Image (tube, coloured by chain):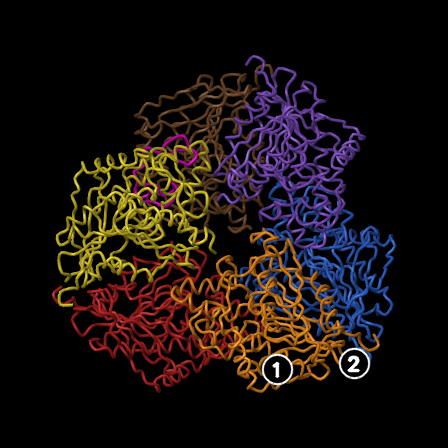
Chain colours: A brown, B yellow, C red, D orange, E blue, F purple
Amino acid sequence: MQFDLPLQELYEFRSAAVAPDDFDAFWSETLAEAAAHPLDARFEPMSTRLSTIDVYDVSFGGYAGQRIAAWLMVPRNGVRPLPAVVEYLGYTGGRGHPSESLMWSAAGYAHLLVDCRGQVGADTPDLGCIGAPQSSGLVTRGIEDPRDYYYRRVFTDSVRAVDAVRRFDGVDPDRVIVAGGSQGGGIALAVAGLRSDVIGMISDAPFLCDIMRCSTITDDAPYSELREYLRVQRGKLERAERTISYHDGVHFASRATAPGFFSVGLMDTVCPPSSVFAAHNAYGGSKRMQVWPYNGHENGMGYLRELHLEFAASLAKPEAVVGG
Amino acid sequence: MQFDLPLQELYEFRSAAVAPDDFDAFWSETLAEAAAHPLDARFEPMSTRLSTIDVYDVSFGGYAGQRIAAWLMVPRNGVRPLPAVVEYLGYTGGRGHPSESLMWSAAGYAHLLVDCRGQVGADTPDLGCIGAPQSSGLVTRGIEDPRDYYYRRVFTDSVRAVDAVRRFDGVDPDRVIVAGGSQGGGIALAVAGLRSDVIGMISDAPFLCDIMRCSTITDDAPYSELREYLRVQRGKLERAERTISYHDGVHFASRATAPGFFSVGLMDTVCPPSSVFAAHNAYGGSKRMQVWPYNGHENGMGYLRELHLEFAASLAKPEAVVGG
Amino acid sequence: MQFDLPLQELYEFRSAAVAPDDFDAFWSETLAEAAAHPLDARFEPMSTRLSTIDVYDVSFGGYAGQRIAAWLMVPRNGVRPLPAVVEYLGYTGGRGHPSESLMWSAAGYAHLLVDCRGQVGADTPDLGCIGAPQSSGLVTRGIEDPRDYYYRRVFTDSVRAVDAVRRFDGVDPDRVIVAGGSQGGGIALAVAGLRSDVIGMISDAPFLCDIMRCSTITDDAPYSELREYLRVQRGKLERAERTISYHDGVHFASRATAPGFFSVGLMDTVCPPSSVFAAHNAYGGSKRMQVWPYNGHENGMGYLRELHLEFAASLAKPEAVVGG
Amino acid sequence: MQFDLPLQELYEFRSAAVAPDDFDAFWSETLAEAAAHPLDARFEPMSTRLSTIDVYDVSFGGYAGQRIAAWLMVPRNGVRPLPAVVEYLGYTGGRGHPSESLMWSAAGYAHLLVDCRGQVGADTPDLGCIGAPQSSGLVTRGIEDPRDYYYRRVFTDSVRAVDAVRRFDGVDPDRVIVAGGSQGGGIALAVAGLRSDVIGMISDAPFLCDIMRCSTITDDAPYSELREYLRVQRGKLERAERTISYHDGVHFASRATAPGFFSVGLMDTVCPPSSVFAAHNAYGGSKRMQVWPYNGHENGMGYLRELHLEFAASLAKPEAVVGG
Amino acid sequence: MQFDLPLQELYEFRSAAVAPDDFDAFWSETLAEAAAHPLDARFEPMSTRLSTIDVYDVSFGGYAGQRIAAWLMVPRNGVRPLPAVVEYLGYTGGRGHPSESLMWSAAGYAHLLVDCRGQVGADTPDLGCIGAPQSSGLVTRGIEDPRDYYYRRVFTDSVRAVDAVRRFDGVDPDRVIVAGGSQGGGIALAVAGLRSDVIGMISDAPFLCDIMRCSTITDDAPYSELREYLRVQRGKLERAERTISYHDGVHFASRATAPGFFSVGLMDTVCPPSSVFAAHNAYGGSKRMQVWPYNGHENGMGYLRELHLEFAASLAKPEAVVGG
Amino acid sequence: MQFDLPLQELYEFRSAAVAPDDFDAFWSETLAEAAAHPLDARFEPMSTRLSTIDVYDVSFGGYAGQRIAAWLMVPRNGVRPLPAVVEYLGYTGGRGHPSESLMWSAAGYAHLLVDCRGQVGADTPDLGCIGAPQSSGLVTRGIEDPRDYYYRRVFTDSVRAVDAVRRFDGVDPDRVIVAGGSQGGGIALAVAGLRSDVIGMISDAPFLCDIMRCSTITDDAPYSELREYLRVQRGKLERAERTISYHDGVHFASRATAPGFFSVGLMDTVCPPSSVFAAHNAYGGSKRMQVWPYNGHENGMGYLRELHLEFAASLAKPEAVVGG
């Protein structure tokens, strides 16, 4: 069922969320703090049964220099230097097994798949967790203070991932694209808003956009985690709103400049269409929106792949493999 | 629906869980580490609108000396020294508002209601959290290592709460009862297994008993959190089993010596009857089981109150208020 | 999810329900009929294990003089005369065990907790039941005629409870407050609309307001009982509407004069926010609305207690216990 | 899903329910009390748009002489005297519109469709209701005492319906069959157990068999009403069991002597297969069981019609219409 | 819950669906193709246990001359010639057992109950099925091309059924009414739009009206089958829309001229009220709408029977049986 | 929840299903009929954005020579001849976009991904469909006769796919492995039972094993489609059983000789563990079972990939790419 605004109104929709005055200062300081720790990106070759792709077990210093895991997949015979795609994960996911995610490297990109700290499938702990009372999940971890908030650490890790992939010998540092879906789409938006030097951004059904409103218009997880927290902690709404205001994708979107690709399912109750359009409509770079009228959060699935490859190719111009 | 074993089999049921050889050593060391930090129990009188009960905002040093919040309610005109009930909370709960829990103090007990660190309704952070990957909720927090496990900290806090209530002027240190339902019932069991100097234990529909088996026989939260973790982290079953083996209520039960009161709903899908009987049947002290054939996890509700008061009175013999 | 009107519209919302011309006559006659039977309030001291509170098993003559059960809790050492709170119960509830409800007496009030006839947890039968065809539950019992309707009897009992508490030696008849949540909130509204001599009214998430509209905007029980009846008895809509028109909380609200305290959860699908505001906005006395943006029918829980105590204290000015 | 015992065990299954010593005395007295009131069966011809069937609006004195509604449908040109089928209704139903139930009369039977007092779709009130506390629905109405129990009145009405149909001019009093499905099947069983002068009994998926056990093995309504009552009224299990023991279909079955037709769906969670077999296996007359392995409570639907007509014809031998 | 437009707006609602230019040509050709095959209506007398009604096992040539099954029920002693009702079935249904549907024949009509090809309960295969990829069910069978679409065959069969009933000796060919509910209501609309020679049309809660819009405003089956198809086949929306445009009940409605009876439940989530009104408001003949404010897709049930009989009698004027 | 047999019993479990005497003759004839049609395997090179993998759009003659679509992915620089993996799809799926499934080709295999006729996501119609009445979905399509049954066509297509991949220039015909999960796992089993010349079989959580029993022990789709059919078509159980007996994976398993890899989730309600073990325990070749105690039908996901690659490499010994 299409439960949100009609499509024509979605294209006009503007979030009522307002960024705090010190939004940019908050993030400048945050990233500066992280930069004070060594990046120390390490790429350890993995022995796999794949023969067209080389895989590296990656780690680098993220928020507070804490080690973040990732996989790097590169086409074995690809022409160097390679453009790169830095991909962020959906909620609860982990970097998994490299063989699960072979498209970008098969298409001639160095592909960095970045773990998300502390999530159930991850290999990376959320060392910065302070154990404050929270509802189930990670959306309200540290929500009482913007400086303690879980996504402050995640976004910082994710920005640092862009630096990490550039340290890999064979990657062209001037052709890095950030990408992701759902939570990963929200992270990609944040990175695009914080880093003017990426050349493209792909955000499918992004989570973490127009967050406070989403907590009142859908009952689905993970926005429901925020609702659940506020259901119990009735006196902490203002503090939560303040913390969220430093992390809303709508504010990152308006600061982004790289070309952006968005997609949305009009029946998505996890990341409601109006919140995806809120980010899209605010987005500062050139942009494209792919609408799926009959899809929910599963979004475009295989249909997105060709669109992603086209969008990325138009920006990064990967070359074929040697001898291909 | 009664979905678990028939009642006659429940009375015979024995958990297959086995305690590790160093179970007692693990807990001796854990409690010794905590004891190395000052208890520093503080009782700050609260201004409330209650006129028969005095309320104190309590804090004390729990695990690693981290401050744990509690409420102490005492009958304003009760005859000193007072027997005490230390009560632990159900999952996700917090100590709440003192006026929500007035029975024990109205019946002549000093009543310490102990917060549970990090839970969504709590006033106490889980400072010991290391942010390791986990499923939603708290049941798998730190599950990769028994020393990092969430309930190691909670049980330690809860043992220390017994010491704390004894520091209150007017409490008789030789008449302390521990009590709770659901998670609180699991905690009361643990404390009774770790502290031979409490004079009674009340455990209604206890959580955290025969844990691994429960993770395979019910889909309800919070045992489902363990299932969800193992669903994703397919390679970590042995590590999880090892951690759980140091925290299973069945093992605490067999070490307890104080008289115990148990209750169970035969339709309880949250804390399955066989797991409650597993603890009861293993319990080392004298014991009583109250069975509700048509109840689920809501258990006995108001019907339990008279039973609790009788059980406690038979052990602690509270006196009436002055002039009462 | 916030499914009802936006908050700003809720403050403006007016029910379309219209009271019948003889609404006041209907209730005058109803109460006069009841008054023709002896009240015969009896207060039998109970032996309990509580030492700060005295408990009385109460009965009095309600509708048609039928005996209604209640508990009276009074602070043992409270300064007489005591202000009183007459509390009504939520749907399906019964007066339960006195130790479940100790706040008002602990705060210095005589607290009458009134049973609700015929409900599954009650000690009081609904002797006036005529057995007419009805859907499950009590909402449609006797709905074919206003004189046979279940809530006519309940409201009459509830008005008589105010008289009953005044007969207790030690209660100040000029300081009686009526209170309740959900069904109890609807009853409190009705009593406040029928009795100008109460000094305050507390109504949390009241049921039975703007009833016909509620039967079309929510699927949750107990409004669904009315929908279910009309789903089957397709020809009796007009009769049902007529009966309801004599019992809608909106009409009682407009007749009330005592100061009123309301609360509402904006995600309440049981008693939709617009129906709570319908009563609040029509309320004839001074009034206050406490809004919980992220709560459903669980409403404010512990957070309400302090607000209730403050509101009541501002009106009833209870004194501390002797020697307190 | 087939959730109950395997089919071979079902054929061996015996209910553990035990009839009270005075079961037969209880019912003799009950029926004698009813017989002391005039039956006064009235048959008012209805004007309908049906041209092959004549319809009569029937009423007769049931329990305590209270008027019970029914429809009588007779083939306009059928050869007199006609055999008769007295049919009882499923839970919540009412006699409805005569045109909904035309099979028996079209097949040459006088067909009495008996209303069920107080049910939401009925035209007959349950005048004997005493308003005692009960859970939603009718299953626990008056459950504290066998003499007040709802089904005592219903079964008495239903026995009297057999007498009523015999008063209709043109009915052969020696060829009366009782029939029904679900609640109606339970009633037919009861009537067959109480009246040795019916010549056949049809009971599809009967409700009200092995009642106490059913309240623990299914969560579906209406057995859930009993569970819900006992969930709340924890202290009234023995009283409920006693009342039920006078009304369990298993006890009526063992007293029946007329040939019986049963049917059961092996996936029926409303009236579990073992309870249907409990009645069938105890049944005192010759009997036949039709098993539907893949059906739930919808049972055989249209497939039953031919079976019912055959079974009835083998006993009642209806003749064709005049000129047919 | 009433989830669709308010009643006053429903009466004004107009579908945005537009018929293709060649809609009428498409259907003329379709019916002409069918007419090129012999109708060959066969009426085989059945031996049943019914004595007031004669039953015939019917078959006739439908789409592409494929044999379609039906039952014909006629009053044994009815006065010839008889008016006729041709009834179409709800989704998944089959013609079932003749004794399930006796009202029309009992009221003096020849009643043809037409099977729906390929549905799970049917006796008639869908020989024209081409096996194209489709979602579960039949709504998207052959949806890629209007000529392959399932309902093209069904509507053609259903038009031919009108011809078939006229071939029965004793039926008055000038008094044929078409009728049905849900899918059957959609079919009746289609036949009324394609055949100007029927004298009445009854359509209860019709399916297949304003189809594309329905696929976005409800999640219930069977409109969900279309949503599911488009969820997967993201690239085939235009083709599906084109196919649907030849089969939407709104377009048939505007072409109908016979008096029409409609009914709607305002809580119907299967066939949303606005889609029923879309057909009603577009209907070309005189029309009547029966609104059930508290009903879902179950609609009027028994209450409809008297209304149907009245409506049909006003048009077809059936006579009583001989000797009646 | 683990709802099926305990693990130790699963290893001993034997299906009660019995193959018909002419099972082998049925399949010999079926395959011979198919072989009478030309295979005509066509491999059309696709232009994609992938640079390490070459993709071919494949079609070949399956059942009755009907064209079946597939993708072939081959490593661009892989050393010829290549071993091959023929993969079958899960229920409702289609071959999708080639970039979704890159593991096997990246690991040095020619990878044929075979479409499944008529499924919602497929590019291949089920031309052999005869339109017989069926429940939703494909499991009961043509179930009245084994020769008309849907899976007869699918299994035949799937056998032919093995022939097709061997026609590709560069594939080693002596190193073909068949693989799939869920429906694809059932198909792989069938092919392994029908073709002794494949060198390995991978079957994850196979559907279509011990089918009749599964239709009674789970309510989940797609086994529920069979239950739904038999729920309605009460008289066709024997015919359905007969048809199923020619298509049960247990019978194919006992005829297989190639080494087999199985996996099972002990909480799988879609393909219950006992049915997976029924196939495994009957399997004729050497075999390995991977058990996931806490997984449902999602089974091992990424964890399976390494296991699959190891199992396949031990049999097929793929070589690295040129220059790798």
Inspect the image, locate mark 2, and give the three-letter code of the amino acid beneath it: Gly
**Residue A156 image-quadrant placement:** top left
Camera-near label (1 vs 2) is 1
Which residue extends farthest top? F323
Residue E275 lies, with reference to residue E224, above or below; the image says below
Foreground of the two, A7 or E217: E217
Q: x and y percent of residue E258 in the render?
A: 75, 67
Residue F124 lies, with reference to residue C195, above or below; the image says above
Question: Which residue range is magenta in the image?
Answer: A116-143
Which residue extends farthest front? D21
Foreground of the two, E320 or E229: E320
Q: x and y percent of residue F30 in the render?
A: 77, 35
Residue B252 lies, with reference to residue B22, above or below; the image says below
Classify residue D193 as left or right of residue B317.
Answer: right
On the question of residue C280 being in view, the answer is no
Whether tag 1 and tag 2 are in contact, CB under 8 A, the answer is: no
State the quadrant of the C terminus of chain F: top right
Alpha carbon separation for disc pair 1 and 2: 25 Å
Q: Which residue is mark 2?
A: E324
Label 1 resides on the chain identified as: D
Residue B233 lies, with reference to residue C251, above or below; the image says above
How many neighbours does mark 1 have within 10 angstroms: few (below 14), some (14-19), or many (20 or more)? many
Classify residue A193 as left or right of residue C80.
Answer: right
Foreground of the two, E116 or F278: F278
Label 2 resides on the chain identified as: E
Inspect the image, locate mark 1, and give the three-letter code of the amino acid beneath it: Ser
Q: Which residue is mark 1?
A: D59
Residue A135 among those drawn in magenta: yes
